[in-house]
Image: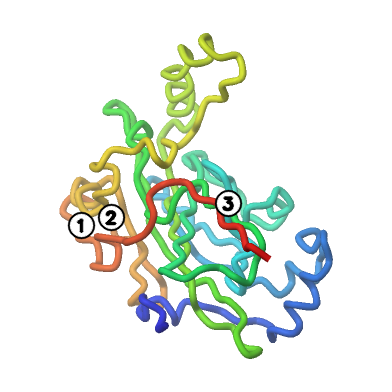
Amino acid sequence: MLYPYPSHIHLLQLLCEPEVYEKIVQNKNFTKLQSYWMILPRYLYAYCPICQVQYSEPADTYHINGWGGIGLQNTLCATSYAKRFINKRCTHFLGIQAFLNFNGQSPTEIKYFGNSSGEVPYMTSQFFPDDLESYAVLHALPVCRIVSERFVPTYTVFFLTYFSESPKEVLARRFAEQAKWSMLDPDFRPATVQPAGFVDEKSYQLELWAKSGKLGWLDFSLPQLPLKIGEGTVLPEIYRAVQGNRNPTIWRREN
């Protein structure tokens, strides 16, 4: 099957051969190995729409191993060890939500994968109160699988990186609105992002969020990946109607 987003293949960086990668990840604790982080490409994925700080981090686009985080993340790679490799955050940074899209493929190369956010990117509308300046930035990268000793683009990870003039206030209000559930159930844990499976249709209509000036995107047609944002912004076609499962899913290989 051909990769469905050829416009993004040029973004992919390959800094090692498949056999080198496979040897490193044989270690159970490979995410703590310096050798692992040395072969990961660093990707630009957002600019702060308020102060223009650039965001770039190492990310594992060689394999599906590096994805599957839950809720709002601080880093692209879903591991706390990644924090030592990130640049300083601006005061407007709220967090990152990643959506791993299988593009109709089954990840048979792994035994288990928890896709808690679903495959289709959506906006958490509670992050956009009327009295606080708030934005999100959309970007996407191909993720490979190893086929015949080659890295082959197969999956796609979509990122929404959130920014606000007061991230702490946004989260405080988000948690406050869920306080009643905590009183009803002592085991309840408040969510940051809106949980997949409980999202209204408007949150999936990214083109409307872009036109309103709340959602920007990195222009993947230009080498510098400039940020496009503001009222009337038009999303490229590939972001307008992403296909896939909108509910949380768990992949388990039968053998």
Tell whether 230 sits left or right of 177.
Answer: left
Q: Is residue 132 or residue 159 the one in the foreground? A: 159
Q: CA distance from mark 1 to mark 3?
A: 33 Å
Q: Where does the N terminus fall, quadrant-wise?
A: bottom left
Q: Quadrant of the rendered structure where residue 50 is?
A: top left
Which residue is disc 2 drawn over? 229
SS state under label 1: loop
Q: Quadrant of the rendered structure where residue 146 is?
A: bottom right
Q: Which mark is residue 114?
A: 3
At a point 32% along the width and 36% down the height, the residue shown is 125
x and y, in percent, of residue 127 in the image:
38, 34
Which residue is disc 1 drawn over? 233
Residue 76 seen: no
Hey, what amino acid is under mark 3?
Gly
At a point 69% along the width and 86% down the height, the residue shown is 17
Hey, what amino acid is under mark 2?
Ile
